[in-house]
Image (cartoon, grey):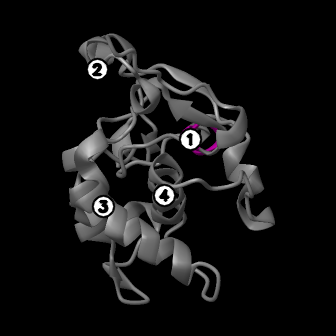
Amino acid sequence: VGLSPAGSEYPALPVFCDERALASVGCPKIEHGISWADFMESACRLCPVGLPCHPASTGEDVVRLATEISRLADTVAFVCVNGLISAMIVAAQFFAVTDHTPPELEEFMGSNASLAPFPFHTLQYSLSANMIPIRLVLCDWTLENLVLNKFAPKVHLETAGVCGMVYD
C-alpha cells in the first residue's frame, strides 16, 4: 500500500518478476501441482517484459510448465489468472494454437493489461496466437537481430513461402 499525491491510500501495483507480488494478484504458491513461483522465475529469465521469449527456450522449464498448465486448464479451474494467461502466451509462442480464448477470460483479453508479476501483457496472447515471429522463418540468419520484435501472419504451410537453395 502506498500514498497517492492527495494523501489517500492506494494498493501498490505488482512489480514484474517479483515473487512477493504473486499473492497480491491472487496466485497461491502452488496450484494443481504447479509452482507459480517456478513458472514466473523461468519466464522472467527467458522472456523480456512485453517481448517474445528467447527462441532457444523450447527445452526450458517455462515451455514445459506452460504446456502442463495449458493441459491442466482443460480439466481444472485456476485461481491464478495472470499465471494462466501467461502460460497461454508462452504456449502460443512455441506451438501452433488457435486463438481460442475461454469465455471466462475474454474480459481480460480485450485490453492491454499487465500480467505482473509475470513478464507479459494480455494482448501478447492474440499476437502470439495469430502471428509468427519473423525470426522463425528467416532464410538469412544474419538478419535475426533486425527482426527480433517483428511478426507476420500465421499461414498454412502449404501456402507459405519456403526458402530456396541454388546450386552451381
In the rendered image, residue 128, in percent from the top left (x then y), is placed at 56, 41
> Label 3's element?
helix
Amino acid at the residue labelled 2: Trp
Residue for badge 2: 141
**Does residue 130 sit above or below 39 in this rendering?**
above
Q: Which residue is mark 4?
A: 91
- Residue span colored magenta: 124-128
As shown in the figure, which amino acid type bears the numbered disc 4?
Ala
Image quarter for residue 60? bottom left
**Can the viewer see residue 104 in this picture?**
yes
Kind of residue at disc 3: Val
Image coordinates for residue 136, horizontal then vertical, percent:
42, 33
Earlier residue among tags 1 and 3: 3
Query: Does the magenta stretch mainly form a helix, a strand or a loop?
Result: helix
Name the residue located 40 percent from the left edge and 48 percent from the top edge: 116
User: Residue at (70%, 40%) from the top-left corner?
Assistant: 158
Q: Amino acid at mark 1?
A: Ser
Name the element at disc 1.
helix
Contact flag, marks 4 and 1 (Cβ < 8 Å) = no
Q: CA distance from mark 3 to mark 4?
A: 9 Å
Q: Which mark is residue 62?
A: 3
Marks 4 and 2: which is nearer the front? Answer: 2
Distance CA(mark 2)–CA(mark 1)? 21 Å
Q: Is residue 156 visible?
A: no
Disc 1: which residue:
128
Residue 36 shown left or right of residue 100 in the figure: left
Alpha carbons under labels 2 and 3: distance apart? 25 Å
